[in-house]
Amino acid sequence: MVRIGAASLAVPVLLASFLALCGQRAALADEVVADLSEHLIAITTGFTGTEVTLFGAVDAPGDVAVVVRGPSEATTVRLKERVAGIWINTRSLTFEQVPGFYSVAVNRPVDDIAPATVLARHAIGLEHLIFGLASEVPPMVTEDGRTMSEDETEALFRAALIRNMQARELYVPEEQTVSFLGDTLFRARVVFPSSVPTGQYTVSVYLIRGGEIVSAQTTPLVVSKIGFGAAVFDFANRFPPLYGLAAIAIAVFAGWLASVAFRRR
């Protein structure tokens, strides 16, 4: 179930108030102006996901691509193999600068708006998302005994990483839609699942003409825990030994309380 914020429902009103500014700035050549319906996603105990709307304007008709990236971190992908009848991790590869969330929205198929070199330069589309390597590429052998090249092995682990992120709904597998309202105004929806990681996000909007990016704008978005759950999370990360002792004490007390209740019965 996705919760739609009130700010998202008020997009027509926001667009109307935003139109004057867009009109002034879009009068300049090759200009794109965009903003979000909200810049903070607050995660509470009952958070089930949410939706944010991006809206904006361009100075003249063109293609628009919206790329949403979550905070990046190193991620290890492990390969399991059957050894002596038991499935165990045998090889691994660690990638760096892996976005914790990734989504793309375009007004038409991404491969039709720009050549692959341009898309790869700006990481527009999952197939153009590039990760750095933080560990050595392990040796791999195919079923017919052929030794795989490092590029082949890296591609194998990369595909597994993307599949894992898609299974967790953190990488949107299909391109989302940028809808134009006339020739210059546009909007796009970004849906965040309940498992969305906290941190600083970037929402990049690209204006593309003739297969080239002629204008771009990046807007920040913050996903943060709030309330009691956030306080517990912060305490656990700042004081892990105390958090562990407190958890043990609570568990012991709960067990003692339950035993007393059963004895009275």
Image: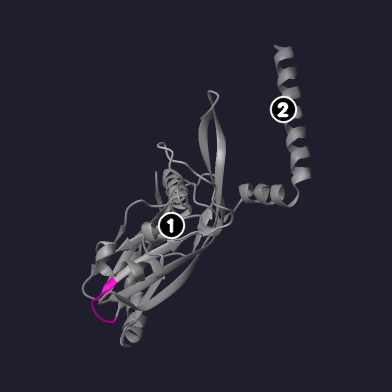
The verdict on residue 60 being magenta is yes
Numbered circle sitting on residue 254 = 2
For the N terminus, the quadrant is top left
- Earlier sequence position, callout 2 versus callout 1: 1
Residue 102 numbered tag? 1
Residue 247, quarter of the rendered image: top right
**Which image quadrant for residue 73?**
bottom right
The reply to whether residue 208 is in sight is yes
Q: Label 1 crowding class (10 Å Cα cut-off): few <14, some 14-19, many 20+?
A: many
- Circle 1: residue type: Tyr
Residue 4 percent location from the top left of the image: 39, 53
Nearer-the-camera pick, 140 or 15: 140
Indicate the secondary structure of the residue bearing disc 1: strand
Q: How is the image coloured?
A: one colour
Mark 2, Cα crowd under 10 Å, few <14 / some 14-19 / many 20+, is few
Quadrant occupied by the C terminus: top right
The part of the chain drawn in magenta is 59-63
Residue 50: where, in percent of width, then height? 43, 52
Q: Residue at x 72, y 30 (%)?
A: 251
Q: Nearer the viewer, mark 2 or mark 1?
A: 1
Q: Would you say 193 lies left or right of 248 here?
A: left
Q: In this rendered view, identify the residue nearer to me: 204 or 261.
A: 204
Residue drawn at (47%, 55%) of the image: 101
Q: Is residue 81 left or right of residue 183?
A: right
Residue 94 shown in magenta? no
